[in-house]
């Protein structure tokens, strides 16, 4: 569904991504793992079409991202940002945050309220007025992240990019949100790019794991194989760190 082909990206003198290639199949969950600053968010943004590569291509269902009509592309690709503050403006209440993508795509019609309530149910949030009128500062971290997920899902995307969607939450809330994302993936059959730090979590939630290190993909394979038989010393180190903790 997505082919990243020979992508390079620098910020100033720093080459963040060096000739990266990776593919994500239809219906697959790919976990992208790497340490802080390794370029995970950069790769997620490139895939979501929000930034451009210096060289290389990203192909989405046979068409190069960047040549696809913007609205059409953003309708098919949902992103949950690393910080919910980037997903949801403090000026929006819950209703408006979820309604905005519908408005942008001229899909806000008589059916919109029902669609918004349905997606709130799907992410296991209350669908009553009192809740829809809450502002971000009136929500818990887990609630806010669920609103960000609802907003990413309202247009029924085919690809969902989740950038460390749970890493700032308590482990118990983190587990609940991950389970929710997995259920959604199961029910909707969407493809997912999960960005995360923790290879132990990646093993539990993904079909395939790719490890980013020093600007390159050093490991890429079925999750069970990567864990049971890592090829690269850096992957081994990540696995040993998880085992040791
Ligand atoms: N807009 C930008 N301008 C300049 N440098 C940037 C920019 N965005 C990212 N970088 C740099 O690129 C590198 C990779 O950043 P990126 O956010 O992709 O890492 P990451 O793997 O997502 O890290 P984290 O796990 O902390 O979220 C870092 O060194 C960062 O400082
Ligand atoms: Mg990041």
Image (cartoon, rainbow, N blue to C red):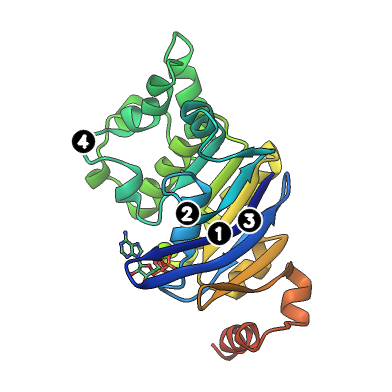
Residue 125 % position (x, y): 45, 39
Q: Measure the C-alpha gap from mark 1 to mark 3.
A: 6 Å
Q: Residue furthest top?
A: 110
Residue 231 % position (x, y): 73, 83
- Of 167 and 86, nearer the camera is 86
Q: Measure the C-alpha gap from mark 1 to mark 4.
A: 36 Å
Answer whether labels 4 and 3 touch (C-beta < 8 Å).
no
Q: Residue furthest front?
A: 55
Answer whether labels 1 and 2 touch (C-beta < 8 Å).
yes
Rendering quadrant holding ligand 1: bottom left
* Residue at x 50% of width, y 71% of height: 197
Query: Along the polypeptide, which appears first: circle 1 or circle 4?
Result: 1
Q: Which residue is mark 1?
A: 7
- The residue carrying pointer 1 sits among few (fewer than 14), some (14 to 19) or many (20 or more) residues within 10 Å by Cα, namely many
Which type of secondary structure does the marked residue at label 4 adopt? Answer: loop
Q: Which residue is mark 2?
A: 53
Ligand 1 within 8 Å of disc 1? The answer is: no
Answer whether labels 2 and 4 touch (C-beta < 8 Å).
no
Whether 135 is drawn above or below 166: the answer is: above
Which type of secondary structure does the marked residue at label 1 adopt? Answer: strand
Look at the image and tell me whether residue 164 can be seen.
no
Answer whether labels 1 and 3 touch (C-beta < 8 Å).
yes
Circle on res. 5 = 3
Q: Measure the C-alpha gap from mark 4 to mark 3.
A: 38 Å
* Residue at x 62% of width, y 49% of height: 192
Whether 150 is drawn above or below 86: the answer is: above
Query: Along the polypeptide, which appears first: circle 2 or circle 4?
Result: 2
Nearer the camera: disc 1 or disc 4: 1
Q: Measure the C-alpha gap from mark 2 to mark 4.
A: 32 Å
- Which quadrant is home to the C terminus? bottom right
């Amino acid at each position: 569904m997505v082919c990243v082909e020979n992508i390079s990206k620098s910020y100033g003198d720093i080459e963040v991504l060096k000739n990266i290639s990776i593919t994500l199949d239809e219906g697959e969950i790919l976990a992208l793992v790497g340490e802080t600053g390794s370029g995970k968010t950069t790769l997620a943004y490139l895939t979501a079409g929000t930034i451009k590569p210096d060289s290389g291509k990203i192909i989405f269902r046979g068409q190069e991202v960047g040549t696809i009509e913007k609205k059409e592309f953003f309708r098919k690709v949902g992103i949950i940002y690393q910080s919910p503050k980037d997903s949801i403006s403090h000026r929006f209440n819950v209703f408006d945050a979820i309604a905005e993508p519908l408005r942008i795509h001229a899909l806000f019609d008589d059916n919109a309220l029902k669609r918004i309530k349905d997606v709130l149910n799907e992410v296991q949030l209350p669908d009553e007025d009192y809740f829809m009128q809450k502002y971000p500062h009136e929500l818990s971290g887990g609630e806010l992240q669920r609103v960000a997920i609802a907003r990413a899902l309202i247009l029924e995307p085919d690809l969902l990019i989740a950038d460390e969607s749970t890493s700032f939450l308590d482990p118990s809330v983190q587990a609940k949100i991950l389970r929710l994302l997995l259920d959604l993936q199961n029910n909707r059959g969407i493809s997912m790019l999960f960005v995360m730090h923790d290879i132990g979590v990646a093993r539990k939630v993904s079909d395939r794991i790719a490890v980013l290190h020093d600007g390159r993909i050093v490991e890429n394979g079925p999750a069970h194989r990567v864990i049971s038989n890592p090829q690269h010393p850096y992957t081994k180190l990540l696995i040993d760190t998880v085992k040791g903790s």
